[in-house]
Amino acid sequence: MRPGSGALTGSERFLSMEVTLDQLKIGEQGILQGYSGDGELQGRLKELGLVRGTLLLMERYAPLGDPVEIRVRGYHLAIRKKDAAQIRVLRVMPGEK
């Protein structure tokens, strides 16, 4: 799987723990499960391709921790950390070979 491509290969291992996007460490991936909070934010993020089932890759945090940069569907997106805290993801780890 190419990280952030939005596609799963079937060799991934899913952790049962749902976390918010801001809790992922650099290099970790998650599958978008839903949103909490502001409906306006949900609409904007959905327009950018962040819909349920989308694979996200945490690329980096800004030097002071805000904003965060993710890779989604082949492009990079910077969002505020407080907005990332409203995005629920299922943590994904690479499968064993």
Image (cartoon, grey):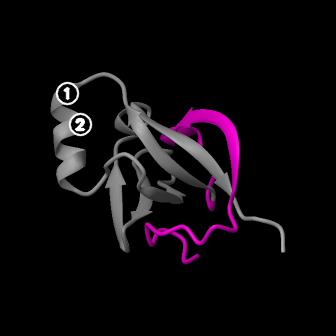
Q: Quadrant of the N terminus?
A: bottom right
User: In the image, 15: left or right of 46?
Assistant: right
- Give the amino acid type for the residue marked by disc 2 in the picture: Gln
The stretch drawn in magenta includes residue 12: yes
Q: Position of residue 71 (x, y in %)?
A: 43, 65
Q: Nearer the viewer, residue 13 or 27?
A: 13
Residue furthest toward the right? 97
**Which element type, helix, strand or loop, lies under badge 1?**
helix
**Which element type, helix, strand or loop, lies under badge 2?**
helix
Count the marks. Answer: 2
In this rendering, is residue 42 above or below 56?
A: above
Q: Position of residue 10 (x, y in %)?
A: 63, 67
In this rendering, is residue 88 above or below 6?
A: above
- Give the amino acid type for the residue marked by disc 1 in the picture: Gly
Q: Which mark is residue 39?
A: 1
Q: Are marks 1 and 2 in contact (CB under 8 Å)?
A: yes
Label 1 neighbour load within 10 Å: few <14, some 14-19, many 20+? few
Q: Mark 1 to mark 2: distance in Å?
A: 5 Å
The stretch drawn in magenta includes residue 34: no
Residue drawn at point x = 45 percent, y = 39 percent: 33
In this rendering, is residue 5 above or below 61?
A: below
Please give the range of residues in magenta: 1-27
Q: Position of residue 50 (x, y in %)?
A: 31, 51
Residue furthest toward the top? 37
- Per the image, the residue denoted by label 2 is 42
Label 2 neighbour load within 10 Å: few <14, some 14-19, many 20+? some
Residue drawn at point x = 34 percent, y = 36 percent: 83
Residue drawn at point x = 59 percent, y = 72 percent: 9
